[in-house]
Amino acid sequence: MERWRGLKDLVQDAVDGGSRAVERLQKHAAKLPFDLLEQIPPISAPVRGIRLVHDTVVSGVHVAIRLVNRVAGYTIDGVLFVVEQQEGPAGTPGGGEASAPGAPAGGRGTERGRP
């Protein structure tokens, strides 16, 4: 089960880090066009508003991605806990040690402090 938890943590970290990187790139890519359009006096005020909406939507989408990623991680932790309890010690069926959901065997905490 530790390998599955490790794999889950790796995928979860990749999604989180990837989302943060893509968010930065999307905002950076839109910066130059917004900067240029804001230099045109008749449209500078509306462009500032549009930039704010753009940046807010981009951030909101990536916050949602990271939230779903976190919820998926907790769900997978729960599934792994149930499977672990059904397998029992050393992969034998039934009678596994009762522990908190997501807690690794042997009572150790996970590297990142998540269940």
Image (cartoon, rainbow, N blue to C red):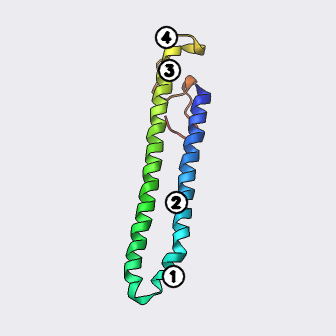
The answer to the question of whether label 4 and label 2 lie on touching residues, with beta carbons closer than 8 A, is no
Other residues around mark 1 within 10 Å, as few (<14) / some (14–19) / many (≥20): few
State how far apart marks 1 and 3 are (Cα): 56 Å
Residue bearing the label numbered 1: 36
The type of residue carrying mark 2 is: Glu
97 or 35, which is in the foreground? Answer: 35
Q: Residue 83, which numbered label?
A: 3
The answer to the question of whether label 3 and label 2 lie on touching residues, with beta carbons closer than 8 A, is no
Residue at point 41%, 77% (across, down): 48
Other residues around mark 4 within 10 Å, as few (<14) / some (14–19) / many (≥20): few
Residue at point 50%, 20% (across, down): 83
Q: Earlier in the sequence, mark 3 or mark 2?
A: 2
State how far apart marks 4 and 1 are (Cα): 67 Å
Q: Residue 95, which numbered label?
A: 4
- Asked which secondary structure carries label 2, the reply is helix
The type of residue carrying mark 3 is: Val
Other residues around mark 3 within 10 Å, as few (<14) / some (14–19) / many (≥20): some
Q: Earlier in the sequence, mark 4 or mark 3?
A: 3
- Asked which secondary structure carries label 1, the reply is helix
State how far apart marks 4 and 3 are (Cα): 11 Å
Q: Nearer the viewer, mark 4 or mark 1?
A: 1
17 or 27, which is in the foreground? Answer: 27
